[in-house]
Each structure stands twice: as structure tokens, then as C-alpha cells.
Image (cartoon, helix red, strand yellow):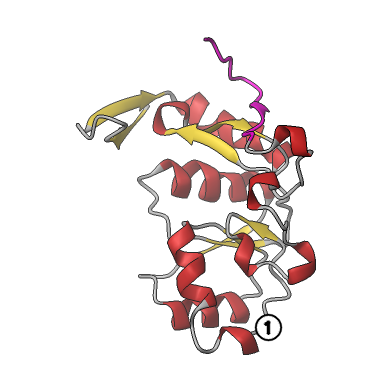
Amino acid sequence: MIVMYTSGSTAEPKGVIHSHGAVIRHPYNLLPFRDLEPGDAAYTPMPLFWVGGLTYTLLSCMHSGATVVFEEHFEPGATLDLIERERVTHVIGWPHMAKALTEHPSFPGRDLSSVRGGSLDALLPADKRVGDPELRANSLGMTESLGPHSIEMIGSVLPREKRGSFGRSVPGVAHRI
């Protein structure tokens, strides 16, 4: 068993209990929706006590054979150095990071051609970016579901009528309204 703490929407901390099997199985079930494979390198500043760091990054990389790239703290210049040096293929982070990285004075001269996926669209080569960010497939999740419970192939382009959609249920997850 593992207990992960979350403040949820109430901001009152609570422990969420997950079985060992669920912790191992859920990131494996996410793999068909991720473009992770052996030889890839995924960078994240997300802490391992949180679902984004543990299930969405570390355990997904372990299942796929990809490498995880960490650093002690986020600093845009040093992070760009790390992404470039390690030939990171997936950058998984928060929107404010994309802003800080793309506004760093050295950003225009960086070789980030290895980046092909992740959650920071702004770091992708221009030909791989989606014009309307609401048409870029994403995911929706929570600590209680060990991360994404709804997902489409990350990075794919949604049809206009699906604009803003978070996708379908992850295998092993049942939605009920």
C-alpha cells in the first residue's frame, strides 16, 4: 500500500490509500496513450510524492524503458542546459515552466530538436505544435485516480468538435455520473 497526500478541491489535506497493484498497473495502462519507448529521456521537476512525478513520470518510464531526468530545483537556464545535454525527448511540467523556459534569453539558440513530447507544447519544434492549444490532446486526473483517468494519445490533434476534451477512460477506470 501507498498513502499519497492531496489537498484536493477543499484544500484540506487528506491521505489517499492505493494498493501496490494499482500503483504498478495504472502507469502501465497509460502507456498506449504516451509516446514513451526505450531510449527516450523524460525530464520532470515534479516531486515523487505526487502523482505527476511518481505515476505519470517515474513509473511510466520504468514500464517503458525510458530514462528519467531530474534536477534539484528548476532554474530556466540550468534546465535548458540539462534538456539540451541529456537530449530529453519528453518535458513534463507545469505551464509556468514553459513560459520561463521560452522567455529565457538563451532559448532561441538552444538545440531542443530531441524534444518530441510531454506536457509543454511551447518547447516542441514549431512544426509539431498545435495552433489551437485546446485542440491538443491532454489528460485529466487526480491523486485519487493515481493521475490521469481520462486521456487521448498525448500530443495528438483533436477534431474541432472535440475541442477541450480530455478524452476517454483509461483502461481499468470506470466513470460514473
Q: Is residue 59 left or right of residue 41?
A: left
Horizontal relation, residue 93 to residue 41: left or right: left
Q: Quadrant of residue 165?
A: top right
What is the residue that sits farthest to the top in this orientation?
A: 177
17 to 62, vertically: above or below: above
- At label 1, the amino acid type is Asp
* Number of numbered labels in the structure image: 1
| Few, some or many residues within 10 Å of mark 1 (<14, 14–19, 20+) | some
Classified by dominant secondary structure, the portion drawn in magenta counts as: loop
Q: Is residue 168 magenta?
A: yes
Residue 13, percent from left and from top: 21, 33
Please give the name of the residue rendered at 40% of the width and 33% of the height, measured from the top-left corner: 143
Residue 92: tell me if it is visible. yes
Give the residue displayed 62% in from the left and 34% down from the top.
166
Residue stretch rendered in magenta on the structure: 165-177
Q: Is residue 49 above or below residue 173?
A: below
| Secondary structure type for disc 1 | loop
Q: Position of residue 4 (x, y in %)?
A: 33, 35
Q: Is residue 19 magenta?
A: no
- 156 lies above or below 146: below
Which residue: 57% across, 83% down?
107
Place of residue 37 in the rendered image (x, y in percent of width and height, measured from the top left): 74, 53
Would you name the residue on which mark 1 appears? 111
Tell me which corner region of the image, top left, top right, bottom left or bottom right, holds residue 170: top right
Q: Is residue 15 left or right of residue 50?
A: left
